[in-house]
Image (spheres, rainbow, N blue to C red):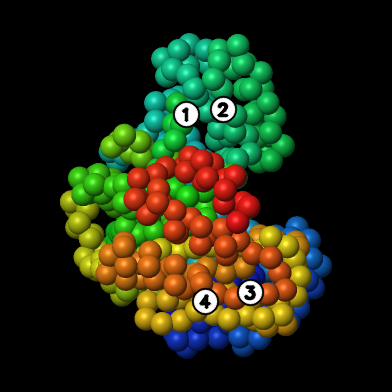
Amino acid sequence: MINKLLIANRGEIAVRIIRTCKEMGIKTVAVYSTADKGGLHTHLADESVCIGPPASRDSYLSQSNLIAAALKTKCGAVHPGVGFLSENAGFARSVRQEGLVFIGPSPEVIEMLGDKVKARAAAVKFGLPVTPGTQDAVLDNALEAVKGIGFPVIIKAAAGGGGKGMRIVRREADLEENIRIARSESLANFGDERVFIERYVENPRHVELQILADGKGKVAVLGERDCSVQKNHQKLIEESPSPGVTDAMRDHMKTGAVNMFRELGYCGAGTIEFLVEGGVFYFMEVNARVQVEHPVSEFVSGVDIIRQQIFACTENTLEIDGADVGGADGVRLSGWAIECRINALSPGRVTKLTVPGGIGVRFDTFLSEGCFVPPYYDSMVGKLIVHAANRQQTLAKMERALSELVIEGIRTNRTQQEYIIKDKTFRSGVFDTSYYGSIAKEVEYV
């Protein structure tokens, strides 16, 4: 086991990783930009290193600064956290070339899964359905291909993500121009102009499986999460299990996912995402990292995902049971968990913080009274996660916990989250990714 690890990230996820490392007896090194000087993660870590000015490109995205910090402090491994460089194959490769352990899958696996065309082909190989579309990125015969798919379609960057190089097309007359724009955006953002086309699923549920794998064939599935409550494609609320997934669908998802991750020799934590529409599911993508919403899976499984991720990548083993060939996993799931993301609507100094508590309540955050929330990074400042025996009890617990949460000095979306948790459509469990749009006018004026 390594004795020191550098966390190439900031904020809540850095705090989360530090806490598990302390329990494992691993010393930690925090990195920070000048905007994050004095942040909670720098106080909790054993050491901290400034890696640059506020701009991400000069600090948290600076591979050379991060690797230099790891070498200077004599770390044995680098954990990329979420966002920033967490799915950057080049960074993973550079970390390994310096003799350090990258807490994540191999650069080759990250590269392959980051290519959406190759990832789709892999999904098909392992029996996971994909939306009708082009299996390669050659679009000289685009119109002919689209006639076979049917409108509306979505053009996607093969090497892309984050909505870049993505265009929805509803009419034949708009196809050629949108392909040109998508290619241009893809080249500008990813250095790769390849795009592909698939049928656009209008209002699906967004469901994902939490995977852990040891790189030697052992794969564990920690259930699924429903992430359908989204604003502008940004997740707001996640829950496990999903109210929209049947047992048969779940088994099919798990079997294909286990076979895919096993064949890839995947190591660490990962998430396989699906679109669910009318009782049918379609493979969307794999996130080759730990997810922001991993705590809901930790609550229902009782598994520390960060701990297992570190074990997998440093020891090539897991402390939990894997799945058998049929896709049934050895991890026993219990109860229901829901997470509400608490986002800052303005930068500023936190003047008061009251954190909810009680059985089955967890608040992951980097906030403390007197801390300053800078304007340079992701707006999420915390995650409120609750767990109870069933969905009804979990909703009641979340409603209570949100009412106890007090953050003063900055504006947050806490009251909007309360509105959603109390809303009858959300409580019914019958909703999809169009849900937030249907209540936007009401919820945003709460």
Name the quadrant of the N terminus.
bottom left
Q: Is label 3 in a helix, a strand or a loop?
A: strand
SS assignment at label 4: helix
Residue indicated by mark 4: 404
Observer-side mark, 2 or 4, equals: 4
Give the residue drawn at x 44%, y 48%: 228
Label annotation for residue 168: 2
The percent coordinates of residue 317 (x first, y second) are: 34, 71
Q: Are marks 3 and 2 in contact (CB under 8 Å)?
A: no
The residues tagged by marks 1 and 2 sit, at their Cα atoms, a distance apart of 7 Å
Q: Quadrant of residue 190?
A: top right
Residue type at mark 3 is Ile
Q: Which residue is mark 3?
A: 407
Spatial CA span between label 4 and label 3: 10 Å
Residue type (three-letter) at the residue carrying disc 4: Glu
- The quadrant of the image that shows the C terminus is bottom right
Front residue (pair 128, 360): 360
Amino acid type at circle 1 is: Tyr
